Amino acid sequence: MLRLLPMLLLGILLAGCSEEAPQPQVDNAASSAHNLLEFTLPDLEGESRKLAQWQGQVVMVNFWAPWCPPCRDEVPAFIELQEKYADKGFTIVGITVDTHENAQTFADTMGINYPVLIAEEEGIEIAKRYGNRVGALPYTALLDRRGNIVFTHRSELSLEQAEEALKAAL
């Protein structure tokens, strides 16, 4: 936990000032589909998962932490989206920058119905590959079926905003 303290403090500061901001431009060379899908993280069951396993689907990648209030607030909308669009080739993948124990407790409490991967401090570096240059939480990127970023959002994402972006990608 001590090694996470500096990251937690930074995250709290960033979460508190994550107002609606202009969306970052995607650097096509740095964020090619191949580069974005190239990482392996454990899920809540301890199984190694690669984001590439969802290639061919529309994937919403959400970087979050259980201690981040805006992250907590957007989870019910994500649960609803997962239920509504899973049969249309869509999935949400939550990537937490916290510990397995904290993520598991939160996921169980909220009834999260989509995969949660445990990245701890590595999650901030992965999020940067998705355009999150300042390391803000929450941060969401939507990937099309080819694995290209088609939408990004820094700060809490409403159900309406997420659904609008998703419908355009499906």
Image (cartoon, rainbow, N blue to C red):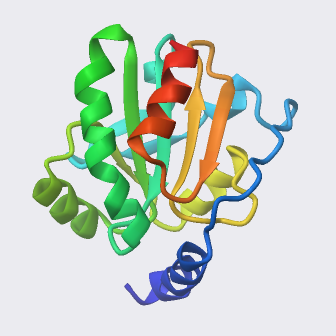
Relative to residue 78, is residue 145 depicted above or below?
above
* Residue 144 point in image, percent of width and height: 59, 19
Closest to the observer: 162 or 106?
Answer: 162
Q: Is residue 83 visible?
A: yes
Relative to residue 58, is residue 164 depicted above or below?
below
Closest to the observer: 104 or 19?
Answer: 19
Q: Residue furthest front?
A: 160
* Image quarter in which the N terminus is found: bottom left
Q: Quadrant of residue 113?
A: top left
Q: Is residue 52 visible?
A: no
Residue 47 located left or right of residue 64: left
Relative to residue 24, is residue 164 depicted above or below?
above
Closest to the observer: 85 or 120?
Answer: 85
Q: Residue at x 65, y 33 (%)?
A: 151
Q: In which quarter of the image is residue 135?
A: bottom right
* Residue 24 point in image, percent of width and height: 79, 47
Residue 142 located left or right of residue 133: left
* Residue 65 point in image, percent of width and height: 40, 65
Q: Which residue is drawn at 40% across and 61% down?
A: 71
Residue 142 located left or right of residue 128: left
